[in-house]
Amino acid sequence: MWIFAFSPRLHAETVSLSEEQAIQLFYQRNLNLLAARYNLESAQAQEIIAAAIPNPNISVQVWELSKNPNTNAPSAGCPIGTQTNPQNCGPGMWATLSQLIEMAGKRGLRMQSSAIAAQAAESDFRDAIRIFTNVVRDAYFGLLQAQKVRWLAQEMVNHYVEILASNRLRLQSGDISESDLLRVESESLRASSDLDNAQAAVEQAQGTLAVILNWPDKSMQFVAEDRFPQLKDIGQDLSRDAMINKALSLRPDLEGDKRRADQAEKDLELARRLKIPDITLDAGYALDPGNTNLNTGFVGISLPLPLFYQYQGEVSKAAVNLNQTRLAAEQTELGVRNDVVNAYANWVSTNAVVKRFEAELLNHATQTRDRMELAYRHGAATVLDFIDAQRTYKSVMLDYYTAAINRVNAYYELAKSLGVEPKADLMAQTDEPQKIRSDRLRTISTVDQAPAPAE
């Protein structure tokens, strides 16, 4: 029976954390993601602004406010007065209503431009989800790898504790020499040092994950679930060209750049129409008792004349912006193609390595270690052969854990390059950005308030 000699630090209370829980914590607490969501809300607010119709203006003027306004004025609105009995007609009033009328469909173009901008902001939000989700996964599976290494180091320590107890009895009976016992003790001390280093690596990985999650409660007690994720079909069996076409149709960053190019086209057309002046319609009514015409209505129209400036600067600026956005979309498309090619090559390589480990190397290393240990216990193998078998087993297991984590990361990197989210439940959350809470932003200035709990 093995004797487990755990480090005191391992006795601390732990909090099991699944991959999905880590990502959900990130959705709730990450400030960069919340900022991306607020950019989306800002773009949606801009749609309302663009659709707004100019408010009318109303003005009222009163004149003839002197002490004796329109005294004895020869008008129909004034009573006839005399020098000894003057008559005051009273002040006049003028009320005007003005309404700006936008011409040449400028308001419609602004509405179309802002609607496209909102679509681009939504694509940017989905792209932020795509990128940051994999950042969380990298940190999460980095923690899992550190835990696997610590588990292996603990296994080696426990194994050497048992072997040392057996070898001390064998030394007393004369089956082994003292030098052989010292060699095994030296390996045991090295295994203990490896365990200390592995524990430090786990704590560093916990800290890295905590920073990404915005340091929720009990961050340094998080323990990743001891299992690798199920690798679902994301199109990894498609041909390379089919993968590229799939990515070109799904990647939100490319979609966002294309939307911005469409918006730039609308902005250019809007700039060209600025030289068509808007008109202002005026209508009003005047009350003037001191005038021949006492009460009268009027209408008017006013517009600026583009004689000296025809908005050439705005048109040139919009044309440059259109060229820049089109160029950015082309560059993003090239980047998408390159991402897919690199991610697919990495996936094929890491998947083959893991399959080779699971088919041959793991069983071979385990059987070799067990057989060599049995032979050493019966005096049929030297202590050097025993130590070499232990080191080989440890090396193979470390390489396997690294390869397994690399395959998981390669799988999710391929999914990211394709614009696919393998977790359907997470995809459902990100389809409606408003579901992602912003509690952390609303309470960030409250020192004593606890962080928002995970849902």
Image (spheres, rainbow, N blue to C red):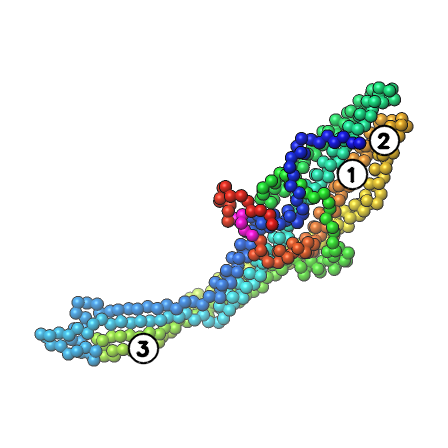
**Amino acid tagged 1:** Met
Residue at 19% across / 77% down in the picture?
78
Q: Which mark is residue 217?
A: none
Does residue 193 appear to the left or right of 320 in the view shown?
right
Residue 440 inside the magenta-drawn segment = yes
Alpha carbon distance from label 3 to label 1:
95 Å
Alpha carbon distance from label 2 to label 1:
17 Å
Which residue is label 3 attached to? 297
Which residue is label 1 attached to? 397
Does residue 6 appear to the left or right of 283 in the view shown?
right
Which residue is label 2 attached to? 373
Image quarter hosting the N terminus: top right
Q: Secondary structure at mark 1?
A: helix
From where the camera sits, is residue 304 visible?
no
- Residue 132, given in percent of the width and then of the height, sits at 62, 49
What is the residue that sits farthest to the front in this orientation? 1
Write down the region rendered in magenta: 437-441
Could you tell which of marks 2 and 3 lies nearer the N-terminus? 3
Name the residue nearer the viewer: 280 or 357: 357
Could you tell which of marks 3 and 1 lies nearer the N-terminus? 3
Name the residue nearer the viewer: 110 or 425: 425
Residue 296 inside the magenta-drawn segment = no
